[in-house]
Image (cartoon, grey):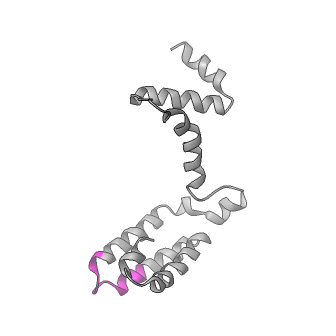
Amino acid sequence: MENSRLAHPNDLAAKKLWVTPIKHLLDEGQIEPLVARLREIAAECAAAQPGLTEEILKEAEYFQTNIQRMRYPEFRAKGLFVGSGVIEAGCKAVIGSRLKQSGMFWTVRGANDIIALRCCRLNGRFEDYWEENRAA
């Protein structure tokens, strides 16, 4: 909700009033009402801030296009994570810890090969990977 900063660059309270209801709709998986609200906000600021209007409409279109990926209540009910933090931490632990050690330099191909091996090892599928790629 970067646009709240653009709409209210020096007013924290106004930013919070702008973002809180939209964030609530997103968290509840109510994407269609969220898109409608963003379009209303865009219409309200069209005359005063045309650049902001364009950004808000882009955001609304993003949510509309990705509505199937934002079924957050359903995902949470299944015990799935909806934020990127878990993935980022996993990448850091699985990939960063192996590829970013002191003095290491990788080609893209070499890094991709090591990543594939590391992921297979950590998933318990190393033997499958080895058998599949040994013949190649």
Question: Residue 86 appears at what percent x and percent y?
Answer: 60, 52
- The one of 22 and 106 positioned closer to us in this rendering: 106
Question: Residue 24 appears at what percent x and percent y?
Answer: 58, 76
Q: Which residue appears at 56% of the width and 71% of the height? A: 26
Q: Name above or below for residue 24 compared with residue 126.
A: below
- Which image quarter: residue 125? top right
Task: Specify whether residue 44 is painted magenta.
Answer: yes
The region drawn magenta spans 39-51
Q: Is residue 29 visible?
A: no
Residue at the limit of the structure toward the front, as seen here:
102
Query: Count of labels shown?
Result: 0
Question: Residue 114 appears at what percent x and percent y?
Answer: 51, 27
Q: Which residue appears at 66% of the width and 33% of the height? A: 123
Q: Which residue appears at 28% of the width and 75% of the height? A: 51
Q: Name above or below for residue 135 compared with residue 117.
A: above
On the rendered structure, is 54 left or right of 135? left
Q: Is residue 37 visible?
A: yes
In the picture, the quarter occupied by the N terminus is: bottom left
Question: Residue 44 appears at what percent x and percent y?
Answer: 37, 87
- The one of 48 and 10 positioned closer to us in this rendering: 10
On the rendered structure, is 37 left or right of 72? left
On the rendered structure, is 71 left or right of 16? right
Q: Which residue appears at 37% of the width and 80% of the height? A: 9
- The one of 27 and 96 positioned closer to us in this rendering: 96
Task: Specify whether residue 112 is painted magenta.
Answer: no
Q: Characterize the magenta stretch by its predominant secondary structure.
A: helix
Q: Name above or below for residue 28 compared with residue 107.
A: below
